[in-house]
Amino acid sequence: MTSYTKTTDFESKDALVTGNPSKTIKGQEIDDEFDALQAADADNVKISSLGTGVNTFLTTPSSANLAAAVTDETGSGSLVFATSPTLAGTPLAPTAAADTNTTQIANTAHVFAERTNTATLTNKTLTSPVLTTPTLGTPASGTLTNCTGLPISTGISGLGTGVATFLATPSSANLASAVTGETGSGALVFGTSPTLSGATLSGTTGLTGGQIAFPAVQSASADANTLDDYEEGTWTPAITGTGTAGAGTYNNVIGRYTKIGRVVHYTGRINMSAHTGSGNMVISGLPFTSESVTAVRNVTTFSEVTNLTLPANTDISGYILENTSQIILNSRSTAGGSVSESALALDTAFILVFSGSYNI
C-alpha cells in the first residue's frame, strides 16, 4: 500500500516517561490510522480473474502494454484512432470488389485491377493524364497538343495511298510512291544547286540565278540536239617558226576562248618585239585540238595588223587545219582577179589582233 501515510508516531510515544499525558494513545488517533488504511486500500483495488497483462495496462495504459495484453491483434506499433492516423510499414486492407463506389479504403490491388476496366467519361476534364494504350473510339472532334507516339500507320485516317509510309520514312522513293502526278524519277529536288540527271525542260525555262554549270570534264553526247559542254578560259598565243620553232620576245600577249559544245570561239592579241625562230610563221597554243576532218579550213580573221612585213599587194590570212592547235599564217593576193596564198615568212616585230572559230 504505497499510498498509505501514517498520521501518528507511536514509536515516539514509547520514548515518553510514564505519566506524560502524550504517552497515552487516544481513540481519535486510532480512528485516524484506520481511516488512512481504508483510503490507501481503496487506492490499490485488486480485481481477480484479469487476463495476463491487463492489470499492467490498467495501471499504465500505453500502446505497448495494450499490445502485450491483447492476444489476437494485427500489426504492431502505436494504438490507432480514427482521425488522421499515421500508418507506417505496409498496412493491409481488404480488396474492394470491381466497380465499388463507396468510401471504403481502396488498396493497391483494387486500384491496379481498376486500371484495365473500361470507364465512360462524360464531360470530364483530366489534368495532365497519362494514358497507356487507350482506345479512344471515334471522337467527333478534339484537339491534340504536345502529343507524341501517335502511330502514323493506324492513328490517322483519310491519308492517301503511301502517305503514311512517307510520313514515317520520308525518303524520295516513298514520296514518289505517294504522289500520283509527278514527272521524272529519282531523288527529290530542292531549289538551291540541285543535280539533275537526264532532265527534259519544256516551254520557257527561267534561270533566276542566271547561270548553268557544266562539269569540269565534259560528258560528251552523241545526240545532235544535246548541249553537253560550256567553258570559258584563257590561252597563250605564241609565234612559232616552221623551220626553227624559236622563241619570241613579247610586249604583250592575250588569249581568250569560249567553248560551246564542239565549237571553240577564240580571240588573241600578240605584240612581239623579237624572235629567234626561222622559216614560215604560225600562231601556236590554241586551247583545243581541232577535229580530224580532212580539207576543212577554219578561217581566222584579223582586226589589227601593225608593222607586219607583207609582200606587195597582199594582206594576211589564217586558217586552222584538221587535228592541230595552230593557226597557219599566209599572205593573200587578189591581183589580176585571182586569189592566191603563200606561206608568210617569220617576222620579228609586229602587232596582230585576231579571232575565229573552229570545231573539235
Image (cartoon, rainbow, N blue to C red):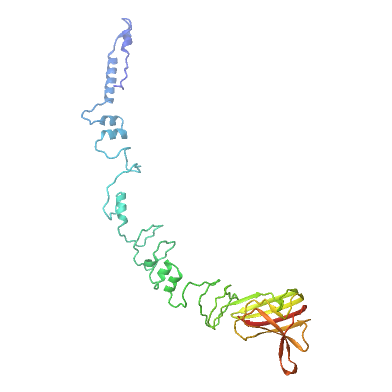
Residue 106 in sight from this viewpoint? no
Q: Residue furthest bottom?
A: 337
Residue 180 coordinates in the image, percent (x, y): 43, 77
Residue 201 coordinates in the image, percent (x, y): 52, 80
193 or 96: nearer the eye?
193
229 or 334: nearer the eye?
334
Left or right side of 104 for 242: right
Q: Residue furthest left?
A: 49
In the rendered image, which quarter contains the C terminus? bottom right
In the rendered image, which quarter contains the N terminus? top left
Q: Residue at x 29, y 12 (%)?
A: 26
Residue 357 coordinates in the image, percent (x, y): 65, 82
Q: Residue 304 occupies which quadrant of the picture?
A: bottom right
Left or right side of 223 for 50: left
Residue 358 coordinates in the image, percent (x, y): 63, 82
Left or right side of 225 for 329: right
Q: Residue 355 occupies which quadrant of the picture?
A: bottom right
80 or 213: nearer the eye?
213
Q: Residue furthest top?
A: 18
Q: Residue at x 69, y 82 (%)?
A: 328
Q: Which residue is drawn at 32% across and 56% down?
A: 115
Residue 333 in sight from this viewpoint? yes
Q: Please, is residue 228 above or below residue 128 in the view?
A: below
Numbered circles on residues, count: 0
Q: Residue at x 31, y 50 (%)?
A: 108
Q: Please, is residue 286 above or below residue 139 in the view?
A: below
Q: Please, is residue 55 above or below residue 82 in the view?
A: above
